[in-house]
Structure formats: C-alpha cells, structure tokens
Image (spheres, helix red, strand yellow):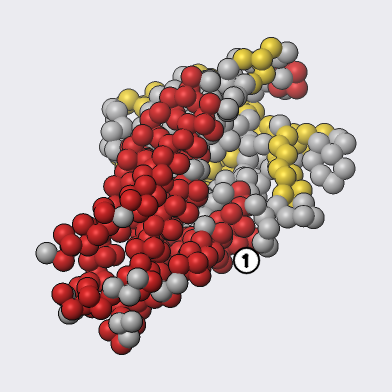
C-alpha cells in the first residue's frame, strides 16, 4: 500500500521522471558519442594497419601469450625435468641515460618448464620457472602465481590427469613441491617443454604536476637448459610472435640451439592478462559520471520535497510509521534508478562496442561473468547512488547542501584520484572509504603483482575488489537512510 502511494507520488512529479530518463539518455549518448570519435591503428614497418586483436584464453579474456617454446607431445601422465642455467639477455636503452644497450634481464623475465594445451596463443597452461629477480615461481591460467619457498636451478613439472605439480631442487635430488594446480578440460595429449620470455623494460617517469608516464623498451632473455628429461624429439614454436618485426628483433631473432644436450633458448614477450593492446570495455560507460549527477538531484529532491512543502506530517498521519515511510521512499528511488541503469547499460554496451569495432578499435575481451558483473554492477551502482542521495536529502532536508554533499562523496573522488590531483596514497584511501569505492565494480582487469606495468589509482586500478567496493556504497546508502529515518522519528518537521 505505502509502496504504491510513494510510486504514485514519484511518477506524478514530471521533473523527477524526466531527470531519471535523462540519466539513462546521458549514459547512452555520451558512450556512443565517445565511441564514434575513437580510432586505433598500428604500424607494420612503414605501413599503417589495423591493430590485431589479442588472443583470448578459455574463459574469453584477452591475454598476452608470447614466448619461445621448445616442446614435444605428452599423452597421458608424465613429467619433464631440467636444470636451468642463469638467465642472461639484452635490455635496450635502460635508465639512467637511455643511451646504450646492455646485457641483463628485467625482473619478470622467465625461463622454465611448461605444460600447455597446444601451441595456440591463449591455450591453457601451467609452468614452473626462474625469473629475473622474483625467484622461482609456479604460474598458470595467466593470473595465478605462487612463489616457491626456496630457490633452486633444477625444475620439474609433473602431470597426473588434470593436475599439474611444480617442483624445485637445488641439486636434482632433493625436491620441494611448490604447488599443484588443476587445469580443467586438459586433453589427453598436451605439449611439454622449455620456454623463455621477457616483457618490455619499463621506465616510469614521475610528473611534478602529478601522475607518471611509462615508456617501454624491447628486451630479450636467454637461458641454458641441461639434463633435460625426456630427451630427444623436440620441436620449436614461436608462440604469439607477430609476422611484423622491428629491425632490432630481426637482428636478434628468438629461437633455440642445441649442442651436447644443452639447449640455449632465447625469447621475448610476456604471459599474462592483456592490458595495453586495446580499449577496456568499461570505457564506453564513462557517461556514468554525468548521469549520476542527474540521479543525485532526483534522489535528493525525493528526500527533501515533503519537508520543503510541509506535507510530511500529512504523510505520517496517513502512515504513522516513519521507518516504513522512509523505507518505501528509498525503495522507490532505488528501483527507478536500477531500471534506469539497466536500460542505460543494456543499450550502451552493445551499441558503443559495435561502433568502436566498426572504427577498427580493439576492445579487450573479458569473460562472460566479468561482463555480467560490469553490466549488473553499474546498474546497482546507479540504484545505490539514488538511495544514498535520497537518504542525504531526507537527512539534511535542504536540496542544495545535499546535492553538493553527495556529489563530493561519490563523483569527485575518482575524478580527483585518476587525474592525479591528489597524491596516490590519498587517492587510494579515498577510493577505499568513500562511496566512490563503488566504481571498482566496473573494472574489467584487476591488479596482479606479477604485472610489470604500474598499477596505481592514477593508472585506473581501484584498491578494493569490485564487489567490496560496491558494498562500501551500499553501507553509505544504508547509513544515510537509517540516519534520516532516525531524525524523522525524532523531528517529523
């Protein structure tokens, strides 16, 4: 009964209905407008070409998967063992002067043993490896990473069905287990072998006005593998390498040689999630910031209208239960905002992404659950923002201060943090404790410690996991409505 009454109030106020509709229109219009103005191209030698789409893994995520692989087929269970010599290689123009080419390896250069579902980029894998400066690791699935408890130059990778176990040893006799990972869907025949890769060398230059610039340089790593078992029957694959290579890459080709049972393998690239080879899908929803301002105004006006017009006593006379009245108003605002969000996201994501692809813009693929989380989470963000705005409006009972308060807490922090107006630690703190933490729900690629690139707030990485960030806004909305209800019970007018 009371819900129906509050819904009738809402829909009879034309400005509230128009403001809600405007919020949906803003998201769609700004998303599509931005999509039509974005272009992307790459160079193949001296020719400008469309950029290739990154490979995808079994879940549909865009990944980086480039390395030199010396391998053979393994059917059923089995293992591979080798002693890995010290990593060496080439780093082009490193700091401080960027004026020479030096020997050495970058921190996340990798050399080791791998089990992989074929040689196609993006195929599932598990690997045990030595790294440039992060010790011995076991990695799988492009994001999973586990450090060994101790270092050693002997590595072993064992397969039993879908279970892959990595080991390390200082002498090839006493083996220590690193961990066992499960690769669901692994076929009976897989490829096992030796691999080497080396991500770009990065220089991060701090900007005195805030933020930083990242420059990348080509690197290559080389490792020697001895005491390799099983012996014989090896093939070479350059997994994920482009047909178009720079002059430097042509004069320092990847590959392997074998002499006296010792394999020397050289490779460049990276294995992990792709973050730089395309546009993140959530970028088409940047109109959300402007749309939230419209929803904030509507939510605040819903909270202040009956106090401004002195009709709140009439409402409480008809329904003398302030808790139910407040909950019904919040529910109506939240439901309207949720529907607005679902419509806005449901239109913007497919239309804007189609426009981008028509302009040859590469969009980084994400898994189905991640796409659902971004879409549904954005709509929930809009719903909670409306409830939060209602609660602050009903609490303060004055529209202008309430709108400014909600905008300062919800919209301003991510803009200030990402544009580097604030020191990184302050921006990260704000995105943990303010309602703006909810924008983490839109992030398609999270931060991972084994990434070489910076992963700060200024780079677009939120300090909280997606659903935890949304929960922060939910708590703020609950607190605002509860406090407004408490004031309503104590002072109806």
State the residue in front, 185 or 138: 185
Looking at the figure, which quarter contains the N terminus?
Answer: bottom left
Please state if 254 lies on the left or on the right of 150 as rendered: right
Farthest residue, direction left: 1
Residue drawn at point x = 29 percent, y = 28 percent: 187
Please state if 283 lies on the left or on the right of 312 as rendered: right
Where on the picture, by quarter, is residue 140?
Answer: top left
Q: How many marks?
A: 1
Looking at the figure, which quarter contains the C terminus?
Answer: bottom left
State the residue in front, 254 or 33: 33
Farthest residue, direction bottom: 490
Residue 330: % across, % down: 29, 65
Where on the picture, by quarter, is residue 185?
Answer: top left
Image vertical order of residue 48 relative to residue 4, above or below: above
Image vertical order of residue 422 relative to residue 247, above or below: below
Say whether residue 236 is visible: yes
Image vertical order of residue 292 relative to residue 403, above or below: above
* Residue under pointer 1: 426
Say whether residue 409 is visible: no
Residue 452: % across, % down: 62, 45
Residue 75: % across, % down: 32, 26
- Identify the secondary structure beneath mark 1: helix
Residue drawn at point x = 36 percent, y = 34 percent: 347
Residue drawn at point x = 54 percent, y = 51 percent: 461
Residue drawn at point x = 60 percent, y = 32 percent: 269
Where on the picture, by quarter, is residue 247?
Answer: top right
Residue 29: % across, % down: 46, 35
Local crowd at mark 1 within 10 Å, few (<14), some, or many (≥20)? some
State the residue in front, 493 or 31: 493
State the residue in front, 347 or 71: 347
């Amino acid at each position: 009964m009371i819900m129906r009454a509050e819904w009738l109030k809402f829909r009879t106020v034309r400005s509230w209905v128009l403001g809600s509709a405007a919020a949906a229109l803003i998201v769609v219009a700004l998303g599509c407008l931005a999509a039509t103005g974005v272009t992307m191209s790459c160079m193949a030698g001296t020719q400008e070409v469309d950029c290739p789409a990154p490979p995808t893994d079994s879940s549909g995520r865009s990944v980086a998967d480039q390395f030199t692989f010396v391998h053979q087929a393994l059917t059923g269970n089995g293992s591979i063992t080798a002693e890995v010599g010290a990593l060496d290689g080439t780093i082009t123009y490193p700091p401080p002067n960027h004026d020479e080419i030096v020997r050495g390896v970058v921190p996340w250069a990798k050399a080791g043993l791998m089990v992989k579902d074929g040689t196609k980029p993006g195929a599932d894998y598990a690997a045990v490896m030595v790294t440039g400066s992060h010790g011995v690791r076991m990695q799988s699935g492009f994001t999973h990473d586990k450090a060994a408890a101790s270092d050693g130059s002997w590595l072993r990778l064992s397969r039993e069905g879908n279970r892959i176990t990595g080991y390390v040893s200082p002498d090839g006799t006493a083996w220590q287990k690193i961990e066992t990972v499960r690769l669901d869907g692994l076929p009976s025949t897989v490829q096992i072998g030796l691999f080497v890769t080396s991500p770009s060398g990065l220089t991060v230059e701090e900007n005195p006005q805030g933020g930083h610039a990242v420059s990348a340089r080509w690197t290559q790593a080389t490792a020697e593998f001895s005491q390799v078992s099983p012996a014989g029957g090896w093939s070479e694959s350059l997994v994920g390498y482009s047909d178009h290579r720079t002059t430097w890459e042509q004069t320092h080709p990847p590959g392997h040689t074998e002499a006296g049972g010792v394999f020397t393998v050289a490779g460049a690239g990276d294995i992990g999630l792709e973050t730089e080879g395309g546009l993140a899908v959530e970028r088409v929803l940047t109109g959300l910031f402007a749309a939230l301002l419209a929803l904030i105004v509507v939510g605040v006006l819903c909270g202040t209208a009956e106090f401004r017009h002195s009709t709140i006593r009439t409402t409480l006379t008809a329904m003398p239960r302030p808790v139910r009245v407040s909950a019904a108003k919040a529910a109506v605002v939240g439901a309207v905002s949720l529907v607005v969000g679902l419509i806005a996201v449901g239109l913007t994501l497919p239309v804007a992404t189609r426009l981008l692809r028509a302009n040859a813009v590469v969009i980084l693929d994400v898994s189905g659950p991640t796409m659902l989380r971004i879409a549904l989470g954005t709509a929930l963000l809009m719903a909670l923002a409306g409830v939060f705005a209602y609660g602050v409006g009903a609490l303060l009972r004055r529209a202008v201060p309430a709108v400014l308060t909600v905008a300062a807490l919800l919209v301003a922090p991510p803009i200030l943090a990402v544009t580097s107006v604030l020191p990184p630690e302050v921006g990260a703190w704000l995105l943990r404790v303010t309602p703006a933490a909810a924008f983490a729900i839109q992030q398609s690629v999270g931060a991972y410690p084994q990434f070489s690139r910076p992963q700060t707030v200024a780079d677009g990485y939120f300090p909280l996991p997606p659903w935890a960030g949304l929960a922060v806004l939910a708590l703020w909305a609950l607190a605002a409505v509860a406090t407004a209800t408490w004031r309503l019970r104590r002072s109806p007018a």
